[in-house]
Amino acid sequence: MAFRNGLSSLLRPEDSVVVLIDHQPYQLANLNSHDPQAVVNNATALAKVAKVFDVPTILTSVIAERGGLIFPHITDVFPDQKVIDRTFINTWEDPAVVDVVKETGRKQLIIAGLWTEICVAMPVIQALGEGWDVTVVTDACGAVSTEAHEVAIQRMISAGANVMTWVAVAAEWQRDWARLEHVEALTEVFKYHAAGSGVAYLWEQQLLNTPAPRAAS
């Protein structure tokens, strides 16, 4: 088994492409591995961070007519983008998706979706077998049970997948706070989606702008 290590193994925005799979109402209705609200938040945050760093992001659903449209929290990030609706359970068997990914010319494939054990595991394992460098954003995924999610993650790791959370992806793309180009936009994402860290940042800004009390004369 080849180990994923060294500087070149870290994610780079110029080499990354994101595929968000089946973040739809039907799947959310039986999501039991995570707090559903957290998964919506995390998937939305991942989409926003990808947009901040100009990382191509493909949105795909499965039989949306019955399963529902992808959450507007995500589609609103890319208002002019057409969602690719599939019949294939395995996204990586659908040329309509794979061809768009290949057209980006990028090889760091980042995947998140619902459910982890089916619509994430299948394309991840197939893409790994085809030589792609695949990262699964685990907290932007979810399954019908905690066991299903954990078993799927272990299965994908055994197949060679890299696993991360959305905050880790953001940090790896940013890499250096001296790179100021994306810092302001990235901070906006953290403010609204990074829970306590975002709120603490707002509090810090409030304190920095609060005049110090004058000493009694």
Image (cartoon, helix red, strand yellow):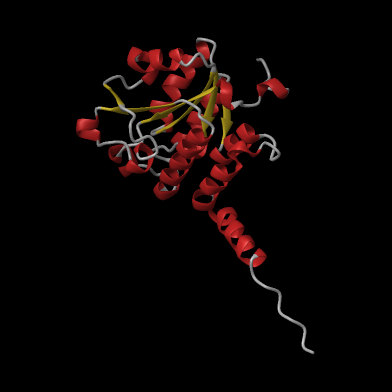
Residue 151 in the image: above or below residue 186: above
How many discs appear?
Answer: 0
Left or right of 95 on screen, residue 67: left
The answer, for residue 56, to whether it is visible in the render is: yes
Decide which of 76, 211 is in the foreground and name it.
211
Image spot of residue 147 (x, y percent): 47, 37
Query: Please, which residue is most extreme toward the left here?
Result: 65
Residue at 38% from the left image edge and 27% from the top image edge: 119
Image-quadrant location for residue 1: top right
Image spot of residue 184 (x, y percent): 58, 45
Residue at 55% from the left image edge and 26% from the top image edge: 135
Query: Please, which residue is most extreme toward the front here?
Result: 217
Residue at 61% from the left image edge and 32% from the top image edge: 173
Decide which of 40, 143 is in the foreground and name it.
40
Query: Please, which residue is most extreme toward the right here?
Result: 217
Left or right of 207 on screen, residue 55: left
Image spot of residue 194 (x, y percent): 54, 50
Image spot of residue 52 (x, y percent): 51, 36
The answer, for residue 147, to whether it is visible in the render is: no
Decide which of 101, 209 is in the foreground and name it.
209
Image-quadrant location for residue 157: top right
Query: Please, which residue is most extreme toward the bottom here?
Result: 217
Decide which of 173, 177 is in the foreground and name it.
177
- Give the quarter of the figure containing the C terminus: bottom right
Image-quadrant location for residue 204: bottom right
